[in-house]
Image: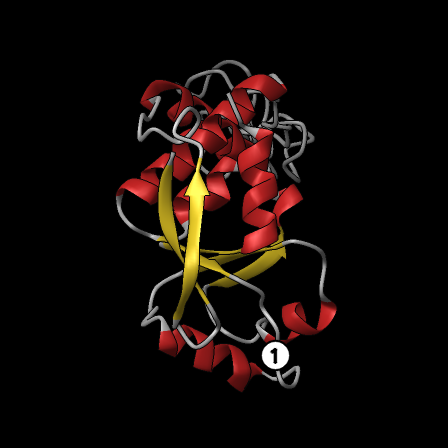
């Protein structure tokens, strides 16, 4: 077991919190993490790229000139892929790039992503996130107290609409319940802020 600092929203240390070394031992399964991150990236692809083949291009309903006697190559339509303005061969069409991996692999990837954040000292555990009023300036004060300038992911114990609404106007700040987090979100954000109860539940989920 090892202990990490526990803070309040003013960035003052208010205690210590134990971490299960069996799960968060600093080891990162890079091939697995890369595989899972690739899956989430593929699932975000819209797959809407589309081109027009010769059947979709307007015009070319008649033969442009007679078959023989012109000295030119034979042509049946001006919309042939060989002609300027014609259709495109083997171009992209709308498709679904998404796929899934087993839940066990996705959970292990979350552990690896968390280990990276612990290794780089990018995890902040807050006793309880409570705002005096549901306004952007309250979140700005918290981020300033912890000197967070880059992207930040905040994991709540339970959904809190006031807390979530107050931070939605701050660029690169994501606030969500811990249950819906995935490895890509943890890995892609620079800092990770977690409520104490959410952190305990996250730890228990991956206990060895």
Decide which of 101, 181 is in the foreground and name it: 181
Find the residue positioned furthest to the left.
Answer: 120
Residue 49 visible? The answer is: no
Picture residue at 56% right of the left edge, 82% below the top: 136
Quarter of the image for residue 190 reads: bottom left
The count of marks equals 1
Q: Is residue 19 above or below residue 71?
A: below
Q: Residue at x 65, y 43 (%)?
A: 180
Quick one: 158 or 40, which is closer to the camera? 158
Q: Nearer the viewer, residue 7 or 157?
A: 7
Q: Is residue 85 visible?
A: yes
Q: Residue at x 54, y 29 (%)?
A: 92
Residue count near mark 1 (Cα–Cα under 10 Å), binned few <14, some 14–19, many ≥20: some
Say whether residue 106 is left or right of residue 121. right
Colour option used: secondary structure
Taking the spot 49% from the left edge, 36% from the top edge, the residue there is 183
- For label 1, the residue is 131
Does dot 1 land on a helix, a strand or a loop? loop
67 left or right, relative to 143: right
Task: Locate residue 157, reporting x and y percent.
Answer: 65, 53
């Amino acid at each position: 077991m090892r202990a990490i600092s526990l803070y309040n929203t003013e960035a003052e240390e208010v205690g210590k919190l134990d971490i299960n070394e069996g799960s968060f031992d600093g080891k990162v399964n890079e091939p697995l993490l890369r595989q899972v991150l690739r899956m989430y990236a593929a699932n975000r692809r819209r797959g809407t790229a589309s081109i027009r083949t010769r059947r979709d291009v307007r015009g070319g309903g008649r033969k442009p000139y007679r078959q023989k006697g012109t000295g030119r190559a034979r042509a049946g339509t001006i919309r042939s892929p060989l002609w300027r303005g014609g259709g495109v061969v083997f171009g992209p069409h709308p498709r679904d790039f998404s796929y899934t991996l087993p839940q066990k692999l996705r959970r292990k990837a979350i552990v690896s992503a968390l280990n990276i954040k612990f290794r780089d000292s990018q995890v902040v555990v807050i006793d309880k996130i409570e705002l005096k009023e549901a306004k952007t300036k309250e979140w700005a004060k918290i981020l300033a107290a912890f000197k967070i300038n880059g992207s930040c992911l905040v994991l709540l114990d339970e959904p809190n609409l006031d807390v979530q609404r107050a931070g939605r106007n701050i660029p690169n700040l994501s606030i969500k319940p811990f249950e819906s987090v995935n490895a890509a979100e943890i890995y892609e954000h620079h800092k990770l802020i977690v409520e104490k109860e959410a952190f305990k539940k996250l730890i228990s989920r991956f206990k060895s």
